[in-house]
Image: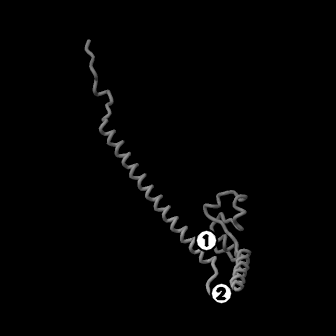
Amino acid sequence: MNFTINLATRTYLDHRVINRVAYSSIALLLVLAAWNIYRVSSAMGEQSRLSSEIAAIEGRLSAKPGGISDSDFTRQKGRVRYYNTIIERKSKIILGGYGTVVKDDILEPYADYICREEGVAFMRRLLGETEIPMP
């Protein structure tokens, strides 16, 4: 009795091709990892630069400018605070777009109006203007 192997029905894997594909995908993943590390490190550097600039600007704004008396500076800060409260009372916050898919009870503390429709028509209605039919 002779045993024979039928080569036409058996599946053979070319291990060299599989290894090349695996090495290529590993190399690609390493390149992508290096690129992401570079992006994160540059973003962190930019963040620290911006933080130092913000601290410098806040330091300049909180300090009293030269040549102004303490009473004048205090009075001016009081005026700015007063006008800011007027602006806050008269301003209205309108939320619209993709951020409005959240339920109303979550959005209400953050907005005076919520627009879930076409924005121009909503604003015209809000301001009391006549509606213009869409073309």
- Which label sits on residue 68? 2
At label 1, counting other C-alpha atoms closer than 10 Å, the crowd grade (few under 14, some 14-19, many 20 or more) is: few
Of 85 and 134, which appears nearest the observer? 85
- Residue 1 position in % (x across, y down): 26, 11
- How many discs appear? 2
**Residue 49 image point, x, y percent:** 51, 67
In the drawing, what numbered circle is on residue 134? Answer: 1
Residue 93 percent coordinates (x, y):
68, 70
Residue that appears at 71% across and 59% down: 104
Query: Residue 91 sits in which quadrant?
Result: bottom right
CA distance for labels 1 and 2: 57 Å
Give the left or right position of residue 45, taking residue 4 as reference. Answer: right
Question: What is the secondary structure assignment of the residue under circle 2?
Answer: loop
Q: In the image, what residue occupies the spot 30% across and 35% down?
A: 14
Q: Amino acid at mark 1?
A: Met
Please state if 37 lies on the left or on the right of 130 as rendered: left
The local secondary structure at tag 1 comes to: loop
N-terminal label among 1 and 2 = 2
Q: Image quadrant of residue 6? A: top left
Nearer the observer, 79 or 125: 79
Q: Is residue 58 left or right of residue 26?
A: right
Describe the colour scheme in one phrase. one colour
Residue for point 69% across, 64% down: 110
- Depicted 106 relative to depicted 118: above or below: above
Task: Choose between 68 and 120: the one closer to the eye.
Answer: 68
Q: Amino acid at mark 2?
A: Ile
